[in-house]
Amino acid sequence: MSSEDEFVHKDHKSREAYLPYSKQWISEEDIQAVVDVLRGDYLTTGPYIEKFEQSIAKYVDAKYAVAFSSGTAALHGACFAAGIMDGDEVITTPMTFAASANCVLYQGGTPVFVDIDKDTYNIDAKKIPKSITDRTKAIIPVDFTGQPADLDEILEIAKANDLIVIEDAAHALGATYKGRKVGSLSDMTMFSFHPVKQITTGEGGIITTNNRVFYEKLLQFRSHGITRDKSKVQDSHGPWYYEMQFLGYNYRMTDIQAALGISQLTKNERFLKWRKKYAAMYNEAFSRMDMLDTPFQNRMIESSWHLYVIRLNLSKLCGSRKEIFEALQNENIGVNVHYIPVHLQPYYSELGYKRGICPNAENLYESIISLPLFPAMTERDAEDVITAVKKVMLNYSNK
Ligand SMILES: *Cc1c(COP(=O)(O)O)cnc(C)c1O
């Protein structure tokens, strides 16, 4: 106990400056890459878009990639390409950001929430078959925190039931599943480049796929459903001719963003090393504390460690999650909660989704806190987080 006494001085904060839960890391090279585009001929849909798409496709070992203005727009595109329409059902997890389910609603479909596995917090593949009906078209698994979902099981269920798998890998750029990089395993895979994600383009997202039909639909959907491809148009009035063949959107990424993305991608392996290092420090520091659970890791995967989520063992604590969360904030530690289960959001309640349909996710939500984890933080920052967590846990210990 005496060695931990230093943690219980309530008036002494663990650190002076606020540490956010996540933050981008922009280098001088990144800035130069953006400046070069600004001095060039194209600001949008120039040479950098294709280069970025090819770089991402190569990195994840997929044939094709289509960049979008956001990860959400990319998911919308994937639902369109998968043919999701009015009345179709799509299975997903509630333990995610709203976008994973909203993309189904955009296409007039119905998200069906399947509960999570108690250990990995990913969708429980064993529970998926019971939720399949003759209207089910697709499954959207989410690689929560960067830990790939049970893709072999999910892909097998999809194959047996003629479903398309759209993997939401917003957290998982660089993660591997049974030795293979996430991004070429599902029919389509989405990555997000929001500033808190693995790499950033400000806003941005991408779909990777090995399927040429999906690839071409995604390209056209991103730009109003317009094509100039001579082999696809029905008519030709002259060299200016193009056709709008279905209702698409302006979901294009700019060349400015793509140049930033290319530069950022060259650093992702280094970013991953930092993330893994800090996650390992947390694991080591907290593994013997019975007041919380550290993240369970499936042995067949390597996580990209987008988030570090601790689960409070509330029976061993005399404070609530809210009190502990606020105590950590008072220590200048930028904590967060990922996520409020999507089906509990007021919009979804109004659509008729009820509390109780996914008890594992609902219970998990009551006891989780995300700790700061990002490559630009220092070892000292990680030590501050550890100090603060130990201090707060001791203060709230019910022993
Ligand atoms: C960030 C995120 C998205 C959406 O990506 P945006 O680029 O912000 O639109 C979708 N799903 C998950 C799980 C995310 O974390």
Image: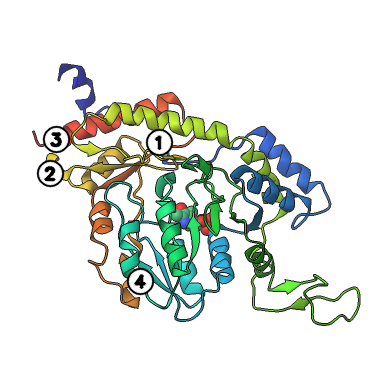
Vertical comparison of 163 with 40: above or below: below
Residue 246 in picture, x, y percent from top left: 66, 78
Q: Earlier in the sequence, mark 1 or mark 3?
A: 1
Give the left or right position of residue 89, taking residue 264 as reference.
left
- How many residues crowd around disc 2 within 10 Å: few (fewer than 14), some, or many (20 or more)? few
Queried on whether the Cβ of the residue with tag 2 lies below 8 angstroms from ligand 1, the answer reads no
| Residue 98 makes an appearance in the image | no
Query: Quadrant location of the C terminus?
Result: top left
The dot on residue 18 is: 1
- How many residues crowd around disc 1 within 10 Å: few (fewer than 14), some, or many (20 or more)? few
> Where does label 2 land, which residue?
315
Queried on whether the Cβ of the residue with tag 1 lies below 8 angstroms from ligand 1, the answer reads no
Vertical comparison of 136 with 391: above or below: below
Residue 151 in picture, x, y percent from top left: 44, 52
Q: Depth-wise, is mark 4 or mark 1 nearer the camera? A: 4
> Where does label 4 land, which residue?
348
Q: Amino acid at mark 2?
A: Ser
Q: Amino acid at mark 4?
A: Tyr
Real-space Cα separation, disc 2 to disc 4, in angstroms:
31 Å
Contact check, label 4 and label 1, Cβ < 8 Å: no
* Residue lying at 43% horizontally and 66% vertically, measured from the top left: 160
Find numbered disc 2 in the image and state the secondary structure of the residue it sits on: helix
Q: Residue furthest left?
A: 399
| Residue 337 makes an appearance in the image | yes
Q: Depth-wise, is mark 2 or mark 3 nearer the camera? A: 2
Q: Nearer the viewer, residue 186 or 4?
A: 186
Contact check, label 2 and label 3, Cβ < 8 Å: no
Q: Depth-wise, is mark 4 or mark 3 nearer the camera? A: 4
Q: Amino acid at mark 3?
A: Ser
